[in-house]
């Protein structure tokens, strides 16, 4: 089996780890609880090789200085990346290229002020929250905002860009 609490360091000197991401080659669920050290301040999550569904839960905090998060599941939808670590700083924001990023509150999205949809992906909220983060949707991209269950989500800032926006809901947006 895999010890998911071991530290993973993607910042190794001399190694080209720019396109390495934490993910899984199999369908199913995987929880990572170890310390992640990003490459050049960028955490990359997703990267499933599976044809169906992967749920990658990251319960550790993403708190490297000047860091950002890229979620990219290589087009294998509906891959889900729940962030459950409460100490996320992610000062340089979040990019969602594909797949679903699931959080319970705005604080799980870090302290950066922006969320970029560089491809078609979904931002899911499991609990009621408000966010003042600016959402930018690139051309030829589709951003989906999805409050789950009875969650209410308030978007209190600009939504910009040339891409499309979909709000789906089992809750209220």
Image (cartoon, grey):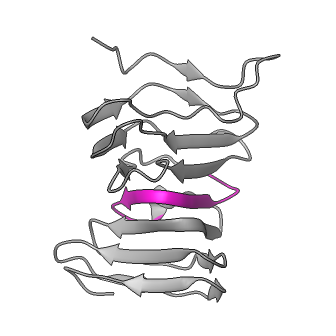
Tell me the residue at 65%/62% (across/down). Answer: 112
Q: Residue furthest right?
A: 14
Residue 16, placed above or below residue 123: above
| Residue 95 or residue 54, whichever sits in front | 54
Question: Residue 120, image x and y in percent?
Answer: 50, 68
Q: Quadrant of the C terminus?
A: bottom left
Please state, as top left, top right, bottom left or bottom right, where the N terminus lies in the image: top left
| Magenta-tinted stretch | 89-106
Is residue 92 part of the magenta span, yes or no?
yes
Q: Is-magenta flag for residue 146? A: no
Residue reaching furthest to the top: 1
Residue 46 in picture, x, y percent from top left:
46, 43
103 vs 39, left or right, is left
Residue 111 makes an appearance in the image: no
Residue at the front extreme, as displayed: 51
The answer to whether residue 157 is left or right of residue 169 is right
> Quarter of the image holding residue 136?
bottom right
In this rendering, position of residue 165 left or right of residue 116? left
Residue 145 horizontal/vertical position (percent): 40, 77
Image: 44 above or below 147: above
């Amino acid at each position: 089996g895999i010890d998911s609490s071991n530290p993973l360091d993607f910042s190794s000197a001399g190694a080209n780890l720019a396109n390495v991401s934490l993910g899984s080659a199999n369908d199913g669920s995987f929880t990572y609880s170890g310390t992640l050290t990003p490459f050049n301040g960028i955490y990359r999550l997703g990267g499933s090789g599976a044809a169906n569904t992967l749920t990658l839960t990251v319960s550790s905090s993403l708190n490297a200085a000047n860091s950002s998060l890229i979620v990219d599941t290589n087009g294998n939808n509906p891959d889900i990346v729940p962030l459950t670590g409460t100490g996320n700083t992610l000062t340089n924001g979040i990019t969602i290229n594909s797949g679903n990023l699931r959080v319970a509150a705005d604080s799980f999205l870090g302290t950066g002020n922006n969320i970029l949809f560089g491809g078609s992906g979904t931002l899911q909220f499991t609990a009621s929250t408000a966010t003042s983060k600016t959402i930018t949707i690139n051309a030829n991209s589709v951003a989906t905002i999805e409050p789950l269950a009875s969650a209410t989500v308030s978007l209190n800032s600009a939504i910009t860009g040339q891409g499309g926006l979909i709000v789906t809901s089992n809750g209220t947006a």
